[in-house]
Amino acid sequence: MNMKVNIAGVEWKNPVTVASGTFGSGAEYADFVDLNKLGAVTTKGVANVPWPGNPTPRVAEIHGGMMNAIGLQNPGIDLFCERDIPFLRKYDTKIIVNVCGKSTEDYCEVVERLAGEDIDMLEINISCPNVKEGGIAFGQNPKAAEDITRAVKKYAKQPVIMKLSPNVTDITEMAKAVEAGGADAVSLINTLTGMKIDIHKRTFALANQTGGVSGPAIHPIAVRMVYQTAQTVKIPVIGMGGIACAEDAIEMMLAGASAVSVGTANFHNPAVTMEIVEGIEEYLKANKIEDVRELVGAVKKL
Amino acid sequence: MAERKKETAIVISQEKLADGIFSMWIQTEASKSAKPGQFISMYTNDSSKLLPRPISICEIDKENESLRVVYRVTGGNTGTEQFSKLCEGGRIPVIGPLGNGFPLEAAEGKKTFLIGGGIGVPPILELAKQMKCEEKQIVVGYRDAHTFLKEEFEKNGKVYISTEDGSMGTRGNVLDAICEHGLEADVIYACGPTPMLRAIKDYAEKKNIVCYISLEERMACGIGACLGCVCQTKEKDHHSNVHNRRICKDGPVFLATEVEI
């Protein structure tokens, strides 16, 4: 049985990674998860300089999910390269570094710096709903998305995954734009912008007022957008959004995802990624499927 | 590698201590290495509530591999309300112990204040039980005369009480009680609402007393990965590389002088 997948020329041992921001750089979760068992680890977004993030409260629970407005707190690329990459390299897994920035120059600076580092892929975050500059500003306009893709591709030495926002009218337009800009893959969906009000305190649950909604509550939206995107572009799609078990991951692959990322579910069960890998294997065995890649886009019309 | 896990704890007993305040003993592996001031992540059995509730450890019984948690039910249809309905033999998923805990060694040979306010009172009990020091002064603040854990505190040190409505002990807050009794200390350990901790931090700075405070914040992962529960720090933190630290991982106990609250 084959569990290997090839994403833009990089071979993962299985199609499971983690969603950026839910897993740090893996150090904390390594107490709970054998990182060697993951197809890849996707790191928390890193910028050219350290970012302090948003005021607290930064997280809130909702029915079937959560909201966050962390604001991309990160230690900056220097400490990241010195500490986090060597840590992850000890494990037999692929390293995907998520890159954030406030301007095109910021993104390019980080991507250029990472060109000489021992990492496998880049994921460019143009879809964070919780920062005022950069982030989603590049991810809600096809022209801006294409331009930033083209700009980072000039400096990138690793395959570039563009991470798309669901907070758009038509995600396929964004996917087409980054494909035209030279993206090697797309990942989707980032969180949906939401708001929660604490009726007892009569104030916003998050200091940022709005935050990104994630968790099982958004899974059907993610499946729909992955399906639409996979029908539209030729580059591989990494599917994410509310995946909490192997069944959710398989559903995402049937919709057209070549690989999947697990996010919020890590908070509920720190070992969930390993369980998802095992669950996919069991599904393949039970259904006499030889190769996990047979699942990709295999949904049939009724 | 991967030596920690979420486990299923078993409820040994549950009782209501005061209005909205419940006490639960659970059998759990987390008891083996638990220290006063640490917390556990408690999960509901309701899959629509995904995030763990960080609950402080009130007592540790290593012999019987169990922990006591005393917690407030925060409203109807909440995770804590679900915890309060668990009975003996009930199952509750937990991860723990988490966080750093109170530094006991700082109290050796010293006069101490052990201060708890509201739902910050419970972790002070195990601290009081384990602390070896010259003079242990336990100062606990409640809303009214519906106190909890009072008798247990009395077995572990001299107890001073404040209530907001003055129905028991000193009217006002814990600092009013300290003032009224003319108490003094060399080291302070405190847990409670932020306004109380802010006042204690100011008090300690004015009197030049070493002060440890246990902070609370909304958490998602509980293990230091998501950066949901940070507090601001005076100096740049070596891990975050910015002026904040993770309450779940680097705390919840901090030297009062190192944090901005």
Image: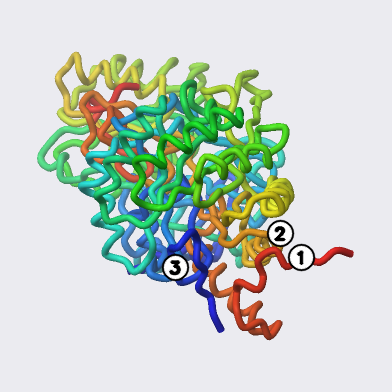
Mark 3 chain: A
Percent position (x, y) of residue B176?
Answer: 35, 15
**First in residue order: circle 2 vs circle 3:** 3
Question: Are the residues tagged 2 and 1 within 8 Å (C-beta)?
Answer: yes
- Estimate how packed mark 2 is, as few (under 14), some (14 to 19) or many (20 or more) residues with alpha carbons within 10 Å: many
When the figure is inspected, residue A166 is found, relative to residue A53, above or below; the finding is: below
**Rounded to the nearest whole Å, what is the CA distance between mark 2 and mark 3?**
21 Å
Distance from Cα at disc 1 to Cα at disc 3: 24 Å
The crowding category of the residue bearing disc 1, from other C-alpha atoms within 10 Å (few below 14, some 14 to 19, many at least 20), is some
- Label 2–label 3 contact, CB within 8 A: no
Q: Residue at x 69, y 43 (%)?
A: A63
Task: Give the Cα distance between marks 2 and 1.
Answer: 6 Å
SS of the residue under disc 2: loop
Q: Would you name the residue on which mark 2 appears?
A: A255
Residue A263 position in % (x across, y down): 53, 51
Residue to which mark 1 is pinned: A299
Q: Residue at x 48, y 26 (%)?
A: A131
Residue at position x 45%, y 71% in the image: A13
- Residue at the spot of label 3: A11
Coloration of the structure image: rainbow
Q: Are marks 1 and 3 in contact (CB under 8 Å)?
A: no
Quarter of the image where the N terminus of chain B is located: bottom left
